[in-house]
Image: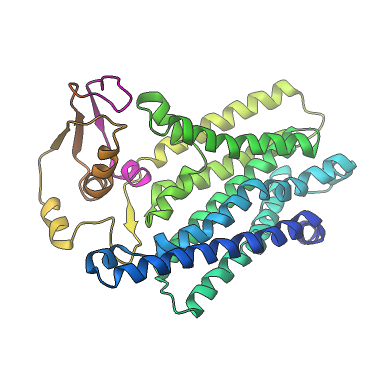
Amino acid sequence: MLAKELREMACGRPLWIMLLILCPLTGFSLFQAVSLYGEASATALNSPALASALSPLDGVLVPTFGGFYVGVTLLFPFVAIRVLGHEKEAGALRLLIQLPYRTPTLIGAKLVAVFAAWLIAAVPAISALAIWEFMGGNLFVAETLNLVLGHLLYGLLVGAIALFAAALAESAATAAIVTLGFTIGSWVIDFAAASQPDLLGWSSRLSLTQTLHTFELGLLSLSLVVGVLVAILGFAALAAIWLPMGVAVRTKLARSLVCVSATCIVLVAATQVKWSADATEDRRNSFSLADQQALAQLSEQLTITVHLAPEDPRYVDLRTSILSKLERVFSRIVIRFAGDQQSVVGRPATSRMVKWSTAMAADRP
């Protein structure tokens, strides 16, 4: 079964068409990133402070993989949908489910085929890393592998959503619309709600694009990795529920409700995993070792009052440079927002207290 899925994936045109599009897209992203990074490096020759702030991760790797990210978001769903949608439209699915394989086994084989398709699609991005190394650029192994891991998890998540959409919809076109609704809808959520407080700001963290944000900063968060893996398995389980024919819709809905509830419970439990690692070469996400040891000796709760609105850009800088580092090494911290400040959009900032755990802080640095 697995050999059949891999063979059909390799024989399909969408995979190779996507690869042909990704090659110039990733190559142009590398060219632009190296050009801009070179100009910034030339300016930094006379400024040691500016030179210390330059990093290949921010200047080259993340922009180069940005082109790959756009291709995976817009094109990879069509490749993943073909794994199941083509058989469904051609009627071969009726014969496939009669084979002596359980439905989870079928979905598992198709998910492995999606993983193989991502590996082929990642060839231009991996080649860009080799070209950057050949040009004399610096690649720190830990932060590079961390970034690749983030894009791998994102690609598998998009693929799992595509499998679920293909199992749910009657045609590949409808499945593609559903999948793009998830991916492009994440962009809409980011633009509309990322700077808003309360519920809207919280909803922006549910978008798929936030999966990559932590990895692009050079952080490896165990809670985020576990959460994405649970989401992938959850969508794969939903695909296995909706794939069989002849099962009543009411039964499928009941099973889907149980699956979604179990996935949400595990996701909430995953947020309690309080471990993260700074994979960057310059340890930008961490304090010095001496400061971390001093903070570890604190036995009382640390309370910080911020006289800024949550959507204020100055608070974003404060959180990136100080608060997120504190939360990674000291879990007993409480951040208070003073209620006598005005937000950047002219609304008074409500007085509230937000408790952050170490794991959640690593997901939202």
| Residue 164 or residue 102, whichever sits in front | 164
| Residue 360 or residue 129, whichever sits in front | 129
Q: Is residue 352 above or below residue 80?
A: above
Q: Is residue 360 magenta?
A: yes
Q: Is residue 128 magenta?
A: no
Say how the picture is coloured.
Answer: rainbow
What is the quadrant of the N terminus in the image?
A: bottom right
The residue at the point 60 percent across, 36 percent down is 182
| Residue 111 or residue 348, whichever sits in front | 348
Q: Which residues are magenta?
A: 342-365
Q: Is residue 263 left or right of residue 342?
A: right
Q: Is residue 68 above or below residue 226?
A: below
Instruction: State which quadrant residue 318 falls in.
Output: top left
Q: Where residue 308 sits: x, y (%)?
A: 22, 31
Q: Is residue 80 above or below residue 4?
A: above
Instruction: State which quadrant residue 51 falls in.
Output: bottom left
Q: Is residue 267 above or below residue 116?
A: above
Asked whether residue 155 is in view, the answer is: yes
Q: Where residue 160 sits: x, y (%)?
A: 63, 45
Asked whether residue 2 is in view, the answer is: no
What is the quadrant of the C terminus in the image?
A: top left
Q: Where residue 42 sits: x, y (%)?
A: 35, 71
The residue at the point 63 percent across, 62 percent down is 119
Q: How many marks?
A: 0
Q: Where residue 327 sits: x, y (%)?
A: 24, 45
The residue at the point 47 percent across, 36 percent down is 190
| Residue 98 or residue 5, whichever sits in front | 5
Q: Is residue 157 left or right of residue 344?
A: right
Q: Is residue 22 left or right of residue 193?
A: right
Q: Is residue 63 left or right of residue 255?
A: left
